[in-house]
Image (cartoon, rainbow, N blue to C red):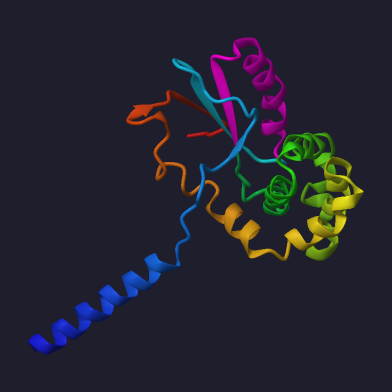
Amino acid sequence: MVLLVVLILSLVLCSIAVSVAQIKLPRKYDGFPYSDDEAGEGSIMVEAFLDPLCPDSKDSWSPLKQALHYYSPNVSLIVHPFPLPYHSNSYIASRALHIANKINSSTTFPLLELFFRFQEKYYNDQTLNMTRASIINDITNLAILAVGNSSLLAFKDGFKDPETNTAQIISFKEEEEIPRTRKKDQAIPRILVGLRT
């Protein structure tokens, strides 16, 4: 009986160890910083969770940027792509943001704004009869307006890259697991935008 309990506990512990070993922890802070400027002393970090194909995210983007510019340099912004499940193509669009960011981080926000501008094109009803591959191809063609023609192959390959997939999968899950500090043991005040409770 004791041997059976030890065997079961060993199996449970081994499965937990294997599960934990498969989680890739990010090397850097998650999200896309709106500016390369460091958050200054006494500044506030606004973290916006935006779905590139959500009308509410689109409506919040312009006022958010206006507030950021008005209160700069006392406020910094990080955008977290947060695909909502009822926008069928949001995961692909959010992953496209990770691809653009990996190719050239200066193209991430122009691509986000292109998604906001043309998001109706990717709504569920408009893409109902399209394959996933054709939606990816269409999003790639849109993204080229932000990243440039010279990055076409790199952008297409980004959808085959497991790193961009992993980045999108864990993008919103790691939010509370990585401490936000600007100096050792000094927390950055944060405001979360785009989360409904």
Span highlighted in magenta in the image: 53-79
Residue 45 versus residue 22 in the image, above or below: above
In magenta stretch: residue 197: no
The residue furthest left is 2
In the rendered structure, the answer to whether residue 24 lies left or right of residue 96 reads left
In magenta stretch: residue 77: yes
**Residue 98 x/y as whole percent:** 67, 49
Residue nearest the viewer, comparing 14 with 135? 14
Which residue is found at the position 55% from the left and 25% from the top? 38
Residue nearest the viewer, comparing 142 with 86? 142
Q: What secondary structure is the stretch in magenta mostly built from?
A: helix
**Residue 57 x/y as whole percent:** 67, 33
Q: In this orientation, does residue 163 appear? A: yes
The part of the image, by quadrant, that contains residue 2 is bottom left
**Residue 33 x/y as whole percent:** 61, 33
The residue furthest top is 70
Q: In this orientation, does residue 128 appear? A: no
Residue nearest the viewer, comparing 190 with 155? 155
Residue 188 versus residue 180 in the image, above or below: above
Residue nearest the viewer, comparing 62 with 123? 62
The residue furthest right is 149
Residue 131 versus residue 187 in the image, above or below: below
**Residue 39 x/y as whole percent:** 52, 23
